[in-house]
Image: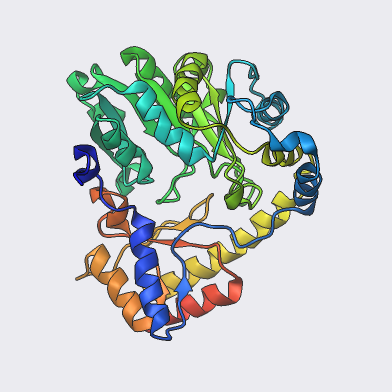
Amino acid sequence: MKKAKRIAKVPPYLFVQIDKQREAMKARGVDIINLGIGDPDLPTPDHITQALHQAIDNPRSFGYPPYEGTFAFREAVAFWYHKRFLIDLDPNSEVMALIGSKEGIAHLFFALLDPGDIALIPDPAYPVYKTATLLAGGRPHLLPLLEKNGFLPDLKKIPASIARKAKLMFINYPNNPTGATADADFLEEAVAFCRKYDILLCSDLAYSEIAFEGYKPLSVLEIPGAKEVAVEFHSLSKTYNCTGFRLGMAVGNSAAINALSIIKTNVDSGAYMALQMAGVEALTGSQSHLKETNGIYERRRNIVVEGLKKAGFQLQVPKAGFYIWPKVPKGYTSAKFVSELLEKTGVLVVPGSGYGKYGEGYFRISITSPDERLREAVKRVAAL
């Protein structure tokens, strides 16, 4: 069997490799504290699971769903966006249900890129942006996210010759992996840049509801005129602690939504309707769990930040999201530090280099573990 050439360009997915390392350590009887993947350990709110139970018993939930998502779900997405961001969306043309936001993000590249087309991709970043560019035959042009710039891309440094050829640009704030946030000034600059060069601005907003000390992350669609050039991806996974549901949404520019629908109608048959029914309850029902959820994550953030700072690590204190992004100690590469940390302490974190070359020199910690495990992990790291 000969594999397609496009596969050869794509490295193994980061968390697949990490899972293999973890399993090998567990087989040796090591107590692993897994601070790798950002999978919430908190329960899905009861009113959502109850709605799912009821939906499963509904005979109407077992048929093929509409390709673009049920109207009830799309309407619920529009309701939530208006309530949260005061953004008006047409559920018929500006909203699409996804089988998790990752699926929609990956498929968008196939909808927009022809072989050789350029995509502007942040680095470090969620690996799917770059790998989907490669799988679609595109060319990723990396936008360095540097600490001195607040981990925001410097759009002024993108050569005009590159910008004129680019089809899309991805941004992700609150950011994975750096934990950085973006203000309205940056979002306005991004919208203006994409309008100037006729680029689709793609915003990944999966972490918008995990925020601390009164901070409220922005949607790019809050920027006047953004819908002319922007599409946004969101997910129920982090907000409602239901990563396994695989339910998300793409919203915004109707032409981009339509292009994405052409790919999706040909490669999948939509999200299970019972999950969409539960999604309606999630989006339109009580949001009261978020206050408690964010209080828990803020406490966990503080446990990790204070412990690592006391141990001499350099890091920024994130205002939102699941992640801490410390620098590795002097004398280490990201991979060497993470490997030695796992081998000597049983604490599993992610090397920054796994998110791109500009992630070198950092590592990522997820705070989706109980307080006592985080305290133990920080204790072990400090003793390394």
The reply to whether residue 182 is visible in this rendering is: no
Residue 158: which quarter of the image?
Answer: top left
Q: Residue at x 22, y 39 (%)?
A: 4
Whether residue 20 is situated above or below residue 252 in the rendered picture = below
Residue closest to the far bottom: 29
Residue 139: which quarter of the image?
Answer: top left
The reply to whether residue 333 is visible in this rendering is: yes
- Image coordinates of residue 284 in percent, x first then y, are 76, 35
Quarter of the image with the C terminus is bottom left
The number of callouts visible is: 0
Q: Residue at x 41, y 31 (%)?
A: 107
Q: Residue at x 32, y 47 (%)?
A: 124
Indicate left or right for 352 with 3 as reference. right
Q: Residue at x 46, y 22 (%)?
A: 230
Whether residue 248 is situated above or below residue 190 in the rendered picture = below
Indicate left or right for 281 with 228 as reference. right
44 and 146: which is toward the camera: 44
- Image coordinates of residue 234 in percent, x first then y, are 55, 36
- Image coordinates of residue 373 in percent, x first then y, are 55, 76
Colouring scheme applied when the structure was drawn: rainbow
69 and 290: which is toward the camera: 69
Residue 196: which quarter of the image?
Answer: top left
43 and 191: which is toward the camera: 43
160 and 10: which is toward the camera: 10
- Image coordinates of residue 41 in percent, x first then y, are 61, 62
